[in-house]
């Protein structure tokens, strides 16, 4: 009791915003006080309804978001801790498991232990998929779901956040004054990828997607968020004399859409493989280096939102038969609170000026705005709910009920408490003693290049 009081006192003095809401009513009062119109519902049945995309039926409306664990073997295949993490997710009961950022090549890994899919380790990935699928289907059946789990893998090029071994090896889409200092390269140093290299990478991405299908995944995510290569190209207005950059959105989306077009022809002609993306719709970086931001000079930080371009991109994706998109925002290396709202920042980092519930509200509202402006048969997955702790399921239900999103994806909650779907479906509430407390330690492990997990809830990582 004394410790709890000291904790609250410390947070008040430091002007931090610890999550101290003891009941849903008190949380709703806080929403009202902050003028946030976030829907809440305790009718959890909506989360147990299936939803169809292409030839697949996703059993329920909860998804595990992709989260790098940096625990692969050197060859990029899933390691023991990787398997452990996904077994835990599979035992939890989410209908969709979105496997973490997996590198398309050695020189664009974000860590020497980031997953990487190759011809040589394909069999190991195949074993991994079959174990997770069997386990997840068993769980879903035991929870009363008739449909089978859906497994998607995220393929990524880490772009300016690439490493060779432990050394930074930035491969940039363009010189970005807002971001270059963070990776400690000047305008002159570091590599800006050429048009020729990008052209070759389009085909590499397709090769890797074919491997993903062979490994048994149901779909592949062409990662376009969080400041990595594709998302950086989306804002590459300052990439000069290039067919992949400049002021026109057509040029800035060319690389991404070329990959999707090629995949449609080579991997998903019969709708039997999901082509999808995790799309960053707003990164908060002021124009001209931002995406989803107001096109005006001298914007304050984070820049005002303007989702005209993200909507145009999603319309293009829809024309290319994409029917599932996982929405995210922010750049975890630059604007982490836009991606994953938190109470405690990374060691040495500042707390954002805004209340974390504003950050939660921003991504919820942007996602629902997108949803309201695109064709109805595009399934939208939302992100950024873990801050809401044990009440997150009620906000998820409110959002799905109000058609503001179709599926709610959980990141840090799943690391801390992989059984959260089971708890919701069976007990009607997520166990408050097991939730993520948004302490940023999992992100801290990533920054230090360590195996990633929950230092608070999981004995494996407490040490
Ligand atoms: C440790 C860690 C690793 C992550 N790795 C990825 C990743 O591989 N790919 C990705 O798209 N997002 C990644 N994310 C972002 C999450 O998928 C998610 O969008 C974010 O944590 C916000 O959701 P939450 O509030 O439920 O945690 C990662 C987040 C964390 C904390």
Image: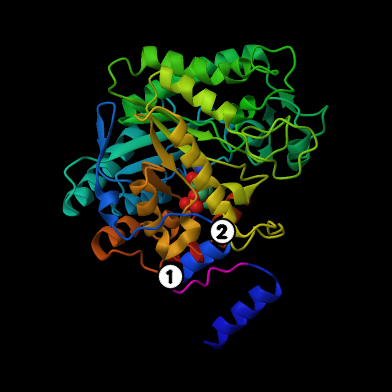
Q: Quadrant of residue 323?
A: top left
Q: Mark 2 or mark 1, which is nearer the start of the sequence?
A: 1
Asked whether the viewer can see residue 74, the reply is: no
SS state under label 1:
helix
Q: Which of the two discs, 1 and 2, sits closer to the camera?
A: 2
Whether the residue carrying mark 1 lies under 8 Å from ligand 1 is answered with no
Any mark on residue 62, and which? Answer: none
Label 1 crowd (10 A; few <14 / some 14-19 / many >=20):
few
Please provide the residue range marked out in magenta. Answer: 17-25
The reply to whether residue 244 is in sight is yes
Q: Residue at x 27, y 23 (%)?
A: 272
Q: Is residue 331 above or below residue 38?
A: above
- Name of the residue lying farthest toward the bottom: 2
Residue at disc 2, secondary structure? loop
Could you tell me residue 359's position as x and y percent? 58, 52
Where residue 19 sits: x, y (%)?
A: 53, 68
Image vertical order of residue 90 relative to residue 392, above or below? above
**Position of residue 458 measured from the top left corner of the image (x, y, whole percent):** 43, 64
Left or right? Give the position of 298 relative to 259: right
- State the image quarter where residue 445 is shown: bottom right
- The answer to whether 312 is drawn above or below residue 70 in the figure is above
Q: Residue at x 60, y 78 (%)?
A: 7
Pointer 2 residue: 35
Q: Which residue is mark 1?
A: 25
Main secondary structure of the magenta stretch? loop
Cα distance, mark 1 to mark 2? 15 Å
The magenta stretch spans residue 385: no
């Amino acid at each position: 009791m004394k410790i709890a009081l000291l904790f609250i006192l410390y947070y008040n003095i430091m002007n931090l915003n610890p999550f101290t809401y003891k009941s849903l009513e008190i949380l709703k009062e806080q929403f009202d006080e902050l003028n946030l119109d976030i829907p809440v519902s305790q009718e959890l049945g909506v989360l147990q309804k299936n939803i169809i995309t292409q030839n697949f039926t996703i059993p329920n409306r909860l998804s595990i978001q992709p989260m790098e664990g940096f625990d692969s073997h050197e060859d990029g295949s899933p390691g023991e801790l990787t398997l452990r993490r996904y077994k835990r997710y599979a035992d939890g009961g989410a209908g969709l498991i979105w496997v973490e950022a997996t590198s398309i090549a050695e020189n664009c890994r974000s860590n020497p232990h980031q997953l990487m899919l190759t011809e040589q380790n394909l069999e190991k990935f195949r074993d991994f998929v079959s174990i997770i699928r069997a386990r997840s289907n068993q769980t879903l059946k035991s929870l009363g779901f008739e449909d089978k789990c859906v497994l998607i893998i995220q393929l990524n090029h880490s772009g300016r956040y690439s490493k060779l071994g432990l050394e930074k090896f930035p491969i940039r889409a363009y010189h970005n004054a807002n971001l270059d200092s963070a990776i400690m390269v000047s305008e002159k140093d570091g590599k800006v990828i050429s048009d020729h290299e990008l052209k070759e990478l389009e085909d590499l991405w397709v090769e890797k997607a074919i491997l993903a299908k062979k490994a048994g995944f149901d779909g592949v995510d062409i990662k376009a968020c969080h400041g990595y290569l594709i998302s950086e190209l989306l804002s590459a207005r300052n990439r000069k004399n290039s067919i992949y950059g400049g002021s026109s959105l057509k040029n800035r989306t060319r690389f991404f859409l070329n990959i999707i077009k090629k995949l449609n022809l080579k991997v998903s002609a019969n709708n039997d493989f999901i082509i999808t993306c995790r799309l960053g719709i707003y990164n908060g970086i002021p124009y001209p280096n931002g995406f989803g931001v107001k096109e005006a000079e001298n914007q304050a930080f984070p820049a005002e939102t303007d989702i005209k371009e993200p909507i145009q991109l999603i319309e293009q994706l829809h024309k290319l038969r994409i029917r599932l998109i996982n929405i995210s925002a922010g750049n975890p290396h630059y604007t982490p609170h836009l991606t994953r709202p938190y109470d405690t920042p990374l060691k040495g980092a500042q707390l954002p000026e805004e209340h974390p519930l504003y950050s939660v509200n921003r991504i919820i509202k942007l996602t629902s705005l997108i949803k309201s402006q695109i064709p109805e048969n595009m399934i939208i997955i939302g992100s950024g709910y873990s801050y809401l702790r044990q009440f997150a399921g009620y906000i998820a239900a409110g959002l799905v009920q109000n058609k503001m999103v179709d599926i709610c994806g959980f990141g840090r909650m799943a690391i801390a408490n992989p059984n959260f779907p089971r708890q919701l479906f069976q007990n009607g509430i997520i166990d408050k003693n097991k939730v993520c407390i948004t302490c940023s330690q999992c992100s801290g492990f990533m920054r230090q290049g360590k195996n990633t997990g929950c230092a608070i809830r999981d004995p494996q990582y407490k040490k």
